[in-house]
């Protein structure tokens, strides 16, 4: 149950696009299409923003998009806004039928 | 409106026990898989345990296996986590979260309850 690997931090200027990677193995990301992404503001509970690799729940901005290639999933935020500054976590189902999270990425909007 | 409200957190000494509760409302609790996820101070999310709607399937993270017990009372719309032999590394905010099958993801989370293990 090793955590998925995410960069500790990423940054971008308003209006730019950024991508956060999430690397796992063939036992999780590579072998399953149940990858999800969560946004978390300080002191708040996580919020689901992407499910099944690339789908957005109702109400989530279309500036958020997800993809997957091999053992790596990615979250892209386009048209970066100050309100996007938060921590982002990926998660994947695993061969053990349990989820695993990434270590989290802190997004700074410059 | 879906609501999940955790309670039961607090300060406990190493080796002690604590029982967390999560009250659910706004949805048919008995039909959903439920989870506990924790977050140590300044750290990332860690999945702890999950329980199927009928309790037929229960899973634990290796870090808590044999010490924590997840349970639910569908008549009371409540989820529980009994924590035994607590260690300093169990210090965290504990969230209950609903798993939504069609999304294969945790779509609603409670606000969390803080557990501090310290002498």
Image (cartoon, helix red, strand yellow):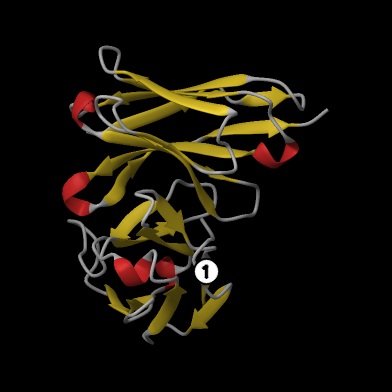
Residue B3 locus on image (x, y percent): 31, 31
**Which residue in the structure is indicated by mark 1?**
A105
Residue at (41% x, 66% y) in the render: A83
Direction top: furthest residue: B75
Establish if A41 lies above or below B52. Answer: below
Q: Residue furthest right?
A: B119
Residue nearer the viewer, A72 or A11: A72
Residue at x 41% of width, y 59% of height: A39
Q: Quadrant of residue B92?
A: top right
Across and down, in percent, residue B91 comes to 67, 38
SS class, disc 1: strand
- Identity of the residue drawn at 29% across and 27% down: B56
* Left or right relative to B72: residue B64: right
Up-down relation of residue B51 to residue A82 (above or below): above
Q: Quadrant of residue A24?
A: bottom left
- Residue B102: horizontal and vertical position, in percent? 16, 50
Is residue A98 at all visible to an observer of this figure? yes
Residue under the image location 54 percent in, 75 percent down: A7
> Total of numbered circles in the picture?
1
Q: Seen in the image, is B30 located left or right of residue B49?
A: left
Chain letter belonging to callout 1: A
Instruction: Give left or right: position of B14 versus A94.
Output: right
| Whether residue A110 can be seen here | no
Q: Residues within 10 Å of mark 1 (few under 14, many from 20)?
A: many
């Amino acid at each position: 149950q090793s955590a998925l690997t995410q960069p500790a931090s990423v940054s971008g200027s308003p209006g730019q696009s950024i991508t956060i990677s999430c690397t796992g193995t063939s036992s999780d990301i590579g072998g399953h299409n149940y990858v999800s992404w969560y946004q978390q503001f300080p002191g708040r509970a996580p919020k689901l923003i992407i499910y099944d690799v690339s789908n957005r729940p109702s109400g989530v901005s279309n500036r958020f998009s997800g993809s997957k290639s091999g053992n790596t999933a990615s979250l892209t935020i386009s048209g970066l806004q100050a309100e996007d500054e938060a921590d982002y976590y990926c998660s994947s189902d695993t061969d053990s039928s349990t989820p695993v999270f990434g270590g989290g990425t802190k997004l700074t909007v410059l | 409106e879906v609501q999940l409200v955790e309670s039961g957190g607090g300060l406990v000494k190493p080796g002690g026990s604590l029982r967390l509760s999560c009250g659910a409302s706004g949805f048919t609790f008995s039909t959903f898989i439920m989870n506990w996820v924790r977050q140590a101070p300044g750290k990332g999310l860690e999945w702890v345990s999950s329980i199927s709607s009928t309790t037929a399937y229960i899973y634990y993270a290796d870090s808590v296996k044999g010490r924590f017990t997840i349970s639910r009372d569908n008549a009371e719309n409540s989820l529980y986590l009994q924590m035994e032999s607590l260690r300093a590394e169990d210090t965290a905010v504990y969230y209950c979260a609903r798993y939504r099958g069609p999304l294969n993801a945790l779509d609603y989370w409670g606000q969390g309850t803080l557990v501090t293990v310290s002498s």
